[in-house]
Amino acid sequence: MGIKVAKFGGSSVADAIQIRKLRDIVSADESIKYVVVSAPGKRYADDSKVTDLLYLCKTHIEHKIPYEQIFQVIYDRFMAVEADLGVDVNIKAELGTIKRDIEEGASVDYIASRGEYLNAKIIAAYLGFDFVDAKEIIKFNEKGKLMEDLTNDLISKTLQNHKSAVIPGFYGEKLEDGAIKTFSRGGSDITGALVARGVGAEVYENWTDVSGFLMADPRIVNNPKPIEKISYMELRELSYMGASVLHEDAIFPAKVAGIPINIRNTNRPQDPGTMITADLEVHENQIISGIAGRKNFTVIAIYKNHLANEKGFIRRLAGIIEDHDMTIEHLPTGIDTMSVVIDNKVLNGKLDEIVEECKYQLKPDSIEVVEDMALIATVGAGMSARKGTSARLFTSLAEAGVNIRMIDQGSSEMNIIVGVEEKDFETAIKAIYKAFVE
């Protein structure tokens, strides 16, 4: 039986009740040898995450505002968890050290990482696993960049000496001076993927508060079906178009090593969750894997006779966008037309400047600007092998009264992106879901 690495997110380790669920999951699967944990998350809607409270302590000290009341909340949470679980790891002394370090000017990265550190200490004792501090196995260079090869070697060699272990997520150590360094985003997820790669895990389980990914946004589609299996490539497409999935940095180490990632629900461990694999699989009864979309785009459509024969046109158009420090989301083209799709967040009031620059440099016959555009991606490895997929998608939108303003299909034929007016966004997603899933 292969090794599994299990990472448990903030909601899965928020209190003693959740940590007992974690123990039940680990105890039921003897292949789980290494556990990566986050800091305690919210226990209820109006609660605070421990990491947020630690950041707040640092902010209060910097502004010479009393912070003791906030720290007491952190103190009480960890003391309660230690007592409720019946373990003794001298958390009181650990908290005293952290409080002193905060007062003596400890770095924000050190302070922010202590939630994971303390939680891992408690959970290791509760499981009867070894505690391995992340700073011993995850290294950054002096510029704060992860040293991937060294980290992989350290994880592999260090964990060989531990039959089972709990590792705090989110942070590591700068090799130069031994200072604690945190990951910028998806921190504990990245740690979990790094550990899975380092030990050559068969599966990397990512335990959270949802039973995997859904085929559409549940705020738009009523009770959408879960995604049972999806490839890294399909996931990337959905993530790019706004689906709430793992950040690319959080899956990259496992992806490189070809390790499947299983998204599971701590509160419903009987659910199979979503399996993310390297292989694109075409299922006979499933054409698409998911639907995702984003609002707030602007399309600049340029018309020029014989545009296709004009050398350097794309380069000059891209240069105009680059000169304004922007990126192009999509670039649909025709024989005499070319459109640039730009996210309004980066457009930032520069639309008129760009249009004028396009007129001056490109000498178009006409320019049309379409604002308030939404993009919707329909993604699936099985789309290219099925006749009539595009027809079904476009027919569903027509029957729902949605006007398609733009179509962009990737060369892989794994996704079809349509641009619609923002007012039609929800209607369009529902129509596509109904056509392919219901």
Image (tube, helix red, strand yellow):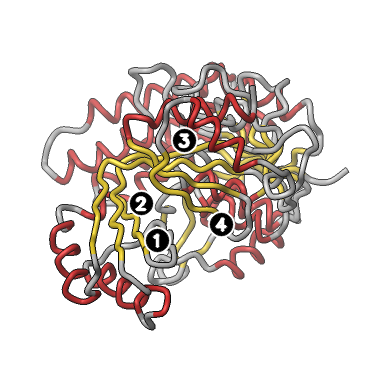
Q: Nearer the viewer, residue 282 or 120?
A: 282
Q: Is residue 303 left or right of residue 150?
A: left
- Numbered label attached to residue 45: none
Task: Work out how far the residue at label 1 is from the one at label 3, CA to CA, in angstroms.
Answer: 19 Å
- Numbered label attached to residue 109: 2
Q: Earlier in the sequence, mark 2 or mark 1?
A: 2
Closest to the camera, between mark 2 and mark 4, is 4
**The disc labelled 2 sits on which kind of residue?**
Asp
Q: How many marks?
A: 4
Badge 1 marks a residue whose secondary structure is: loop
The residue under label 4 is 410
- Residue 170 appears in view: no
Closest to the camera, between mark 4 and mark 1, is 4
Tags 2 and 3 touching, CB below 8 Å: no
Task: Work out how far the residue at label 2 is from the one at label 4, CA to CA, in angstroms.
Answer: 41 Å
The residue under label 1 is 179
Note whether 138 is above or below 426 in the view shown.
below
Closest to the camera, between mark 1 and mark 3, is 3
The residue sitting at 71% across, 26% down in the picture is: 25
Q: Residues within 10 Å of mark 1 (few under 14, many from 20)?
A: some
Q: Earlier in the sequence, mark 1 or mark 3?
A: 3
**The disc labelled 1 sits on which kind of residue?**
Ala
Tags 2 and 1 touching, CB below 8 Å: yes
Note whether 361 is above or below 233 in the view shown.
below
Q: Is residue 75 left or right of residue 160?
A: left
- Residue 27 appears in view: yes
Quadrant in the picture for residue 47: top left
The residue sitting at 61% across, 70% down in the picture is: 149
Residue extending farthest bottom: 311
The residue under label 3 is 39
Q: Earlier in the sequence, mark 3 or mark 4?
A: 3
